[in-house]
Amino acid sequence: MIRTIFTVFKKEVLDNFRDRRTLASALLMGPLFGPLLFAFVINLSIERSLSNVEKTLDLPVLGVEYAPTLVDYLKSRNIDIIAAPENRAAALASVKTGLHDVVVIIPEGYGERMAEGLPAKVELVSDQANTTADRDARRVRNVLYAYNQELAAIRLSVRGVSPLVLRPLNIDDIDVSTASGRSGILLGMMSYFFIFAMLMGGMYLAIDTTAGERERGSLEPLLALPVTRDRLILGKIIATCLFMALSLILSLISFFFALKFMPLQELGMTPNFGPKVVVAAFFLLAPFILLGASVMTLVASFTKSYKEAQTWLSVVLLAPTLPILIVSLLTLRPRLEFMFVPSLSQHLLLIDMVKNEPVNVLHVVISVTSTLILGGLLTWLCAHLYRREGLLG
Amino acid sequence: MIRVDEIHKSFGSVRAVRGISFEAPDGRVTGLLGPNGAGKSTTLRILYTVMKPDEGSASIDGHDVVESSLDARRCTGALPHGAGLYPHLTARENIAYFASLCGIARGNIEERVESIVDLLEIKDFADRHTKGFSQGQRTKVALARALVHDPQNVILDEPSNGLDVMATRSLRELILKLKDAGRCILFSSHVMQEVAALCDDIVIIADGRVAIDDSADGIREQTGCDDLEDAFVAAIQRVSPE
């Protein structure tokens, strides 16, 4: 029994290693794709958050001559005043066409109304559908609010009223998230990359087990041998598992190195992803291997051809994101019942580890055993379906 | 020795095999002849146990193909129609893989593979990956794979399909060699001449039924046709007049 399984296993491993192109896409795609995309997203968000604060904002202001004090105030807040379109209509049009993100219009009567102590109109033109413009508009609006507040305070003081009257509330933001905690949000993507890499690593073998062998015409001779089919499929699933494990190890290592080169500190993140966590993450994610291998083999066994199997398996590649996505969107905290959901339980536990938060041992036990049991059941189902005649297509 | 007794097999509403019976004794070559879609492949698939008959029974060396399919497979070497190889393995590795799966002791595999490589005369390309093999080379390797466990019964489904003259010739020689060694050989074909040249017994099937089961001479006699091709057509029309 063991010998037959091992024979099949050995042949599948050899066969897969000889197929260089498939091997490259299976073992390189997953481990490289994750860290690359990750680096890209992180660099993008760093660029965005840095540019927001430090960069001077070029702001076209129409009617500069009517409000010299306001203009000086804007300049003092790291905003450069540049030439605006000649009139209001042109200003509106320039924002609409995307020439300018934000334009401030100061109407002619501004000075007089200001002098009379009446609300003076200032127009802030922006396209709210444009997210980068929206951020600039918010920045200008905040500066204008601040100016508004200062003026109000001065006017009250002149009338002998304390400016504090205008501040019944004193709102103070206190952020209790730790640096590693903040990284968790972004690093939450990580768990999916690992699952993706795992599935990619075994995908071709899983297809080959049924659809591939059938298409090549090697399935029938194989089934005509004096071997029970259970052993054939077990050997194949174990080989699939090996490649999934290889892919997982490679992507863990690639992430380990990639994170060293990412300027995460600038985002206030210190992910806890040292060698110890890498090893722990492997054992946490490893139970998913059997489940993934059996699901892919199962799905592929129903397809008529290699191509059809690939199409269906790309759906399988996305399936594990679903629970992760739902929980992320609803920002749910880890709960006991979530640990029964494969991919979700691995995701939540991995996030806890990366955030350097205490990991609930019971949660780990439930995650590992439930994923393994489900994987075992599906493997049994695969073996069961491998016995049917329809397999020959 | 292969024995088939009143087997039936349907796929949905298609009745592929409806009551086929025949015997293929040891030391003889039995040909399963019939037009495309007559039920030849289905019959053979039931014999090498990748399918089960709906009704009736079949046995190989006394092992029922359903009840003790593993034993039946142990004494059978099967070459399914269009049998494929593993393209990234060499011919020798392809054969050794099957040898190992058949349970040949690890120490004997190399020797066994070597002797089958000699028997089928595939030494020239035995160590090449099978990816770019010609149809003839592929069939030979597939045949070597099927024979690696030295089976008493050999089932070949349209083995000469796509082979050139030389390859067909060497296949014929091999079949005769196996026959002389006392093996039971059952093969299917839709080419009358090929069957006539090689077979001791011919089972003509059409429409899932046996039209005639006799020797070549017996068939000529029964149908009253001197030409075997005419006899073939006459026999088929007896079963399916349209």
Image (spheres, helix red, strand yellow):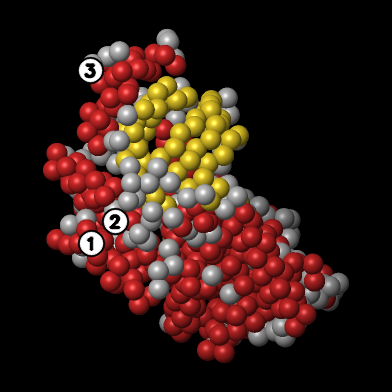
- Amino acid type indicated by mark 2: Ala
Mark 1 = which residue? B117
3 or 2: tag closer to the N-terminus: 2
Q: Nearer the viewer, mark 1 or mark 3?
A: 3
Q: Is residue A92 visible?
A: no
Farthest top residue in view:
B242
Check if mark 2's residue and mark 1's residue have beta carbons within 8 Å.
Answer: yes
Q: Indicate the amino acid at tag 1.
A: Val
For label 1, the crowd category at 10 Å Cα-Cα, with few meaning under 14, some 14 to 19 and many 20 or more, is many
> For mark 3, what is the residue?
B227
Q: Tell me: residue B191, above or below residue A168.
A: above
* Circle on res. B144: 2
Instruction: Judge whether residue B209 can be spotted in this image.
Output: yes
Tag 3: amino acid:
Asp
Q: Could you tell me which secondary element the residue under label 3 belongs to?
A: loop
Q: CA distance from mark 2 to mark 1?
A: 7 Å
Residue B222, placed above or below residue B201: above
